[in-house]
Amino acid sequence: MRIVSLLPAATEIVAALGMADSLAGVSHECDFPAEAAAKPRVTRCLFNAAELASGEIDRRVAETLASSGTIYALDEPLLRRLGPDVILTQRLCDVCAVGYGSVAQMAATLPGAPCIVNLEPSSLADVFGDIRAVAAAVGAIAAGDCLVKGLTARMDAIRDRARAAVHRPRCFLMEWIDPPFSAGHWNPELVGLAGGEEALGSPGRHSARIEWESVLKAQPEVVVVSCCGQSIERMRRDLPILKSYAGWADLPAVRAGRIHAVDGKAYFTRPGPRLIEGLEILAGILHPELFPEFAPDRWHGATVSRLD
């Protein structure tokens, strides 16, 4: 079995199924587990986002998508040499990975007609379904069932304990700082399971650009900054942008000191097994009194950090 994964979540799913050794190639963003870093990279980004300010990244993404239809390039010669039996890809988000159409078109020219698995989740239930789909494609159905069972048990445990909350705080899970973006897909669901009320995100829908005035109107009691693809240190460098927004200092979350940055690319924006760890992180942020083992001070600073 030779598996090529074109998105980080799929790589994490394969590894969680115990089949990391079968990964023949991965995307340029696959960084977990550690052994993924040694695999051949079959994609690259068309620009270096690390060198750009947050506002410029947003503009460059929009411009590149408008002109090229994608922000990624697929290394077709390498993919041919790897000769995959299974290709894991997606058509959920043009900003997340190489588009499904390009992959399918290229795969049709490969000898052996590899199995193409499309991952397109909008909810936690969809993510669990994707895990089972990957497990079936790579011949690990029993491992997939076991993995989903364990993740579901952890999810149910958080949901059940969160029901004891006296108050469900209004939470703004922020996916980008400049311009502001609300969370979408499974993330508002995570907030609800952790005992909060998502103030601006829409479950099952794409993350969306929002006007700052809508944040002021929502008056969030907790703000969790989870910028797609960015480290906590990078989000900390962008804190002055948040502080420059009108009315920032008067938000209930700011007055209460309840502003946290989290490693979004690991635990929130990748629809894989670590979303449940993201749920546990949220539970500790929203209700440290109910979840002391998941309180922010129990996590490494690269996972959760207060912003002040």
Image (cartoon, rainbow, N blue to C red):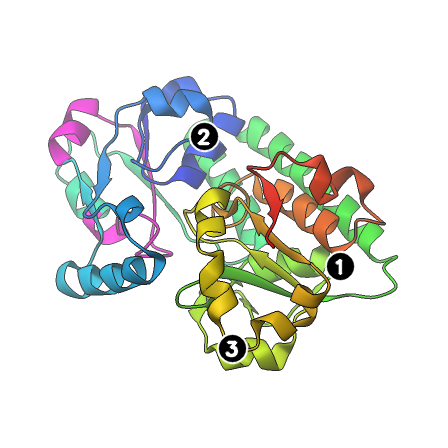
Residue 41 percent across, percent down from the top left:
25, 30
The magenta stretch spans residue 94: yes
Q: Amino acid at mark 3?
A: Ala
Crowding around mark 2 (Cα neighbors within 10 Å: few <14, some 14 to 19, many 20+) is some
What residue is drawn where x is 66% and y is 70%? Answer: 220
Placement of the N terminus among the 4 image quadrants = top left
Of residues 96 and 234, the one drawn nearer to the viewer in this rendering: 234
Classify residue 293 by image quadrant.
Answer: top right
Of residues 197 and 52, the one drawn nearer to the viewer in this rendering: 52
Sequence-first disc among 3 and 1:
1
Determine which residue is flagged by label 3. Answer: 246
Determine which residue is flagged by label 1. Answer: 195
- Residue 217 vs 307, above or below: the answer is below
Alpha carbon distance from label 3 to label 1: 29 Å
What residue is drawn where x is 62% and y is 78%? Answer: 218
Alpha carbon distance from label 2 to label 3: 38 Å
Q: Amino acid at mark 2?
A: Phe
Of residues 177 and 286, the one drawn nearer to the viewer in this rendering: 177
Q: Nearer the viewer, mark 3 or mark 1?
A: 3
Crowding around mark 3 (Cα neighbors within 10 Å: few <14, some 14 to 19, many 20+) is few
- Residue 305 vs 112, above or below: the answer is below
Residue 199 percent across, percent down from the top left:
63, 71
